[in-house]
Image (tube, rainbow, N blue to C red):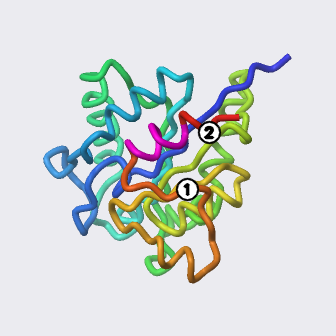
Amino acid sequence: MVRKVKVLFLDRDGTINRDIGTYVTTREQFQLIKGADVAIALAKQAGYEIVIITNQAGIAKGIVTPEQVEDIHVYLNELLAVRNTSFDRSYYCPTHPDYPHPEYDRFAWCRKPETGMVDQAVADYLSSGVEVDKMQSFFIGDKTVDVECGLRAGLRPILVRTGHGEEELCHERRITPEFVADNLYQAITEYVLLNAC
């Protein structure tokens, strides 16, 4: 019988770290939102896998390189290590519809709100002998595309008000999150940990 895991799929910019109004290209620009590291540590202690799901169209735009994105993710795990925690997997989508690129256009299926990155994560877990329990898994982000991606993927979406915090836009488009939180810490401590199935 395949072991099941519950997963927190987390958007990055505006959810875990401060949205600086442009693409994060260096470690110096990467600043954790207050309480985000503690929240991730608490989720891990409660048995959740942590998976980063992030659109990084700055790659197609030539603003940031894949190597820089990957280094920032290494840095994020270094910051999380201070809290004796870490994320488990990370996925990023390099494409943007307005910036055609011969190398990255083939990844259009992964750009949120498309579910490609979530689907890939689920497949990767399955290939390692573990099934993602979607009924117990959440998608947390600060944009409408995060909520929509979560809904499309069969996950439980939560919107945070940090970053873009598109609560009104979600309402206008009738894309309804299961919960709206001020930040990742509140999302995890006041909803995820209290409402797991």
- The kind of residue tagged 2 is Asn
The residue lying at 64 percent from left, 35 percent from top is: 196
Residue 2, above or below 107: above
Left or right of 53 on screen, residue 71: left
Question: Which residue is nearer to you in this view: 77 or 155?
Answer: 155
User: Of 49 and 25, which appears nearest the observer?
Assistant: 49
The residue shown at (54%, 34%) is 193
Rendered view: 120 above or below 128: below
Q: In which quadrant will I find the N terminus?
A: top right
Q: Is residue 134 magenta?
A: no
Q: Choose top left, top right, bottom left or bottom right for residue 56.
A: bottom left
Residue 186: x %, y % from top left: 40, 45
Q: Quadrant of the C terminus?
A: top right
Secondary structure under badge 2?
A: helix
Task: Give x and y (percent) for residue 47.
Answer: 56, 22
Is 82 rendered above or below residue 154? above
Q: Which residues are magenta?
A: 185-192
Measured as percent of width and height from the top left, residue 175 is found at 63, 71
Res. 179 mark: 1
> In this rendering, is residue 134 above or below 59?
above
Q: Residue at horizontal 43%, vertical 57%? A: 160
Earlier-in-chain disc, 1 versus 2 = 1
- Tell me if label 1 and label 2 are in contact, CB under 8 Å: yes
Quick check: 194 left or right of 85?
A: right
Tag 1: residue type?
Phe
Name the dominant secondary structure of the magenta segment.
helix
Instruction: Report which quarter residue 7 is drawn in.
Output: top right
Question: Mark on residue 195?
Answer: 2
Image position, residue 149 (x, y; %)? 62, 60
